[in-house]
Structure formats: C-alpha cells, structure tokens
Amino acid sequence: MKDTDSTLAQFDQAGAERLEKIYLTPDVVQQREQIFQLLDVKPGMRALDIGCGPGLTSLSLAQAVGNQGHLDAIDIAPPMLQLAARRCADAQHVVFHQADVLQLPFEQAAFEVALATQVYEYVADIDGALRELWRVMLPGAQVLLVDTDWESCVWASRDDARMRRIMQGWSQHIPHPQLPRYLLQRLHRAGFADAQVHTVPLINTRYDLQTFSGGMMGFIASFVGGLPEYGPQLVTDWQADVTSMGEASGYFFSLNRYVFVARKPLA
C-alpha cells in the first residue's frame, strides 16, 4: 500500500470527524495556541497551511494574514478538506487544494510563511518533501513544522509490558514515529537555516473523552486491534486497564509535541 493510500484510509469521513473532535478538546486547543505564538505571521502575508486537516490552523492563519493576505491550504484527504472549507467559508482569501506534499501545486518562491502540524511523520520521503517545501518558499520565509516522537508518550498502566506493546503497535501507523530525532538534520539538508526546536507538552491527569488521550484511545485501539499480531482482546484489556486508572486517581498521560521553526536563507 502506498503512503497516500494508507493516509487516506485513516482519514475517511468518520476518521476526519473523530479527529476534529479531538482537535477541539480544551487541551489541544491550548497547545495549538502555544504553538501558533511561535509563528511569525503578519497581515498581508501569503501563507501556506500544509496538511490542513479540519481547518483549525487554516482559520487561525486566515485571521492572522487578514483580507489583504492570502492563504493556500492543502490536504491529501477529501473529508478533511470538506471540514476545513466549511470552517473557513467566510474567508474569501483562503483556497483549499487536494495535494501531496511531494508535489505542491504552487510556483517557486510563492509563500512567506508555512505551517505543517503532524504531517511529515506520515511521509516516507522526508527529504523529497522538504525540498519541495523549500522550493515554494520565498527567500527569508519562515516554516513551522510540528511532529511527535511517540516514544515520548507516558501513559500510566498496571501492565507496563502491555502498554509498551500497544504503543509499539501504534507506531506502525506512520512511516516515521520518531521523526523529531532527525528532522533538524533533514531541514538543514534541504537548505533551511536558523532552525530552532521547541517542546510543547500535553498532559492529562484524568480520564475524559474531552481530552486528547481520551479521544485518541479509540483511534489507537482501532488501529492496533486490526494488526494480525495483536488482535481485539489485547486492546480491550488495555483500554479497560488504562481507563480504570482514573477510578483510583491514578490516570496520567503525557506526550511531547516538537516544534521546528526555520527559515529559507535570503541568499
């Protein structure tokens, strides 16, 4: 199966709507606001939202560049683009495209700022994707990439071996589950400079479906339970164990988001 096919399978209509609900939980909203503060975006800029998902980052970028600016937003999954277009329906300066990060449908040096959240870990050809990003950015332009190292996940459980096995299975849903470890090197290789790295943690201390971990549990269980070497009973036992931790005030979840900010050199 191609990477594109795998991504599309994960983000069908139901998957897109489930992910939108997770992105709207208060903890993820707060984290998104923290990350957006690291972006140097000004009114009148031409911006690019890569992997726009349900359009939450698109709306923020559209508001930041204002009516005098312009935003192009791409995603590979049509259900995501439908949600995003609906969310940004009143923003006439936003255009959505179904596109792959390896073949961006834009001219060279078209953008002054770009944002990508949880995108490049899904792309097998990281170097090719970053070269394509470099191509469409103006000299001096800023890029901000957010990705996750899933081994940074801390999740309280009574069975640590099973917990580790579940996360190892979940890591199979993307080509690069530990991308932040070498993304800085890859950015430099693609020609970007002045790169900085920030860590934005997400912490849940109670089990609640209106949190990132509460919402993601279903995603993880669905994927891992479908792997032939795992099966549904393992994930059912895992879910029962982890959710019951809250009954003893022992629920704890933490995950780091790694934010890479870099620029295309002026010369």
Image: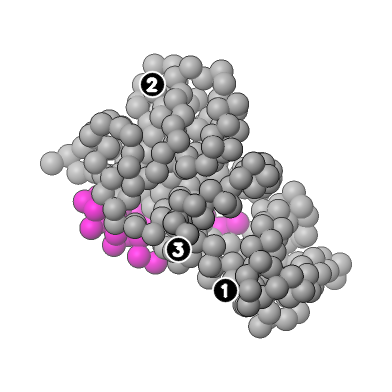
Give the mark nearest the N terminus, 3 or 1: 1
- In this image, 18 relative to 60: left or right? right
Where does label 1 land, which residue? 168
Q: Position of residue 265 (x, y in %)?
A: 19, 44
> Magenta includes 49?
no
Name the outermost residue toward the front: 1
Q: Residue at x 34, y 57 (%)?
A: 126
Tell me the distance, in whole angstroms, between the alpha carbons under discs 3 and 1.
13 Å
Badge 1 element: helix
Label 1 amino acid? Gln
Name the outermost residue toward the left: 267
Badge 2 element: loop
Quarter of the image for residue 2 reads bottom left
Q: Position of residue 72 (x, y in %)?
A: 41, 29
Label 3 amino acid? Pro
Tell me the number on the disc at residue 248: none
Q: Look at the picture and state if 66 lies above or below 117.
A: above
Where does label 3 land, which residue? 175
Give the mark nearest the N terminus, 2 or 1: 2
Query: What's the magenta region?
Result: 181-202
Tell me the number on the disc at residue 69: 2
Residue 217 appears anywhere in the view? yes
> Magenta includes 197?
yes
Q: Position of residue 143 (x, y in %)?
A: 35, 43
Tell me the distance, in whole angstroms, between the alpha carbons under discs 2 and 1.
43 Å
Q: Residues within 10 Å of mark 3 (few under 14, many from 20)?
A: some
